[in-house]
Image (tube, grey):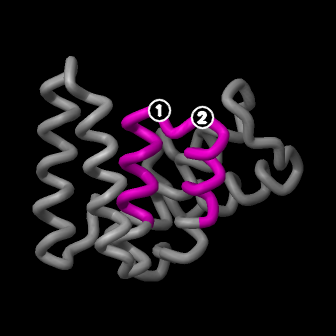
Amino acid sequence: MEFLKQHREAEAVAQLRDALRLQPEITRTSRGLIWANNLAWILATHEDPKLRDGAEAVRWAEQVVAADGSADPATLDTLAAAFAEAGRFDDAIGVANRMAELATEKPEIRSVAQQRIELFRAGRPVRE
């Protein structure tokens, strides 16, 4: 995904949607999982409101988390961010708590989860 590397997110969103349309399989071992997670993250967190779409971000992020078995803190972070963008802060907090639970051996991830929880409690979504 060259556009992501170049920080050209609008083009990346179009490219990711096209890729997922052509190869819609989202499994633990498919490229679709990475594509869908990246798309959901951009749609949930981008600073430009024209690129954000909370409902679409939730749809993609839920598929990713279902495919990876809800055990990856990175994809849970995306789902939490998507819920927050969609205004579903209680759901976002619940997912961020799950992320923290999984990160007992990884203090940096646990710290990110705690920061997200505080952000969501304040009714604020993630922005990058």
Q: Please, is residue 3 above or below residue 53 in the view?
A: above
Give the residue type that dot 2 points to. Asp
Task: Give percent across and percent down for residue 127.
Answer: 27, 64
Discs 1, 2 touching: Cβ within 8 Å: yes
On residue 71, the disc is 1
Residue 101 is left or right of residue 26, and the answer is left
The CA distance from mark 1 to mark 2 is 7 Å
Say which element carries label 2: helix
Residue at image location 36% in from the left, 53% down from the top: 95
Q: Nearer the viewer, residue 74 or 21?
A: 74
Residue 68, which numbered label? 2
Q: Is residue 124 left or right of residue 29?
A: left
* Quarter of the picture holding the C terminus: bottom left
Where is residue 83 shown, x and y percent of the image?
41, 68
User: Few, some or many C-alpha atoms within 10 Å of disc 1 (few <14, some 14-19, many ≥20)?
Assistant: some
Question: Against 86, is 22 above or below?
Answer: above
Pick whichever, 28 or 39, lies toward us.
28
Q: At 51% across and 39% down in the image, what residue appears?
A: 70
Q: Position of residue 9 (x, y in %)?
A: 50, 58
Q: Nearer the viewer, residue 39 or 14?
A: 39
Residue 8 placement (x, y as % from top left): 49, 55
Query: Magenta span covers which residues?
Result: 59-82
Magenta stretch containing residue 62, yes or no?
Answer: yes
Q: Residues within 10 Å of mark 2 (few under 14, many from 20)?
A: some
Q: Amino acid at mark 1?
A: Ala
Residue 12 is a magenta residue: no
Secondary structure mostly seen in magenta is helix
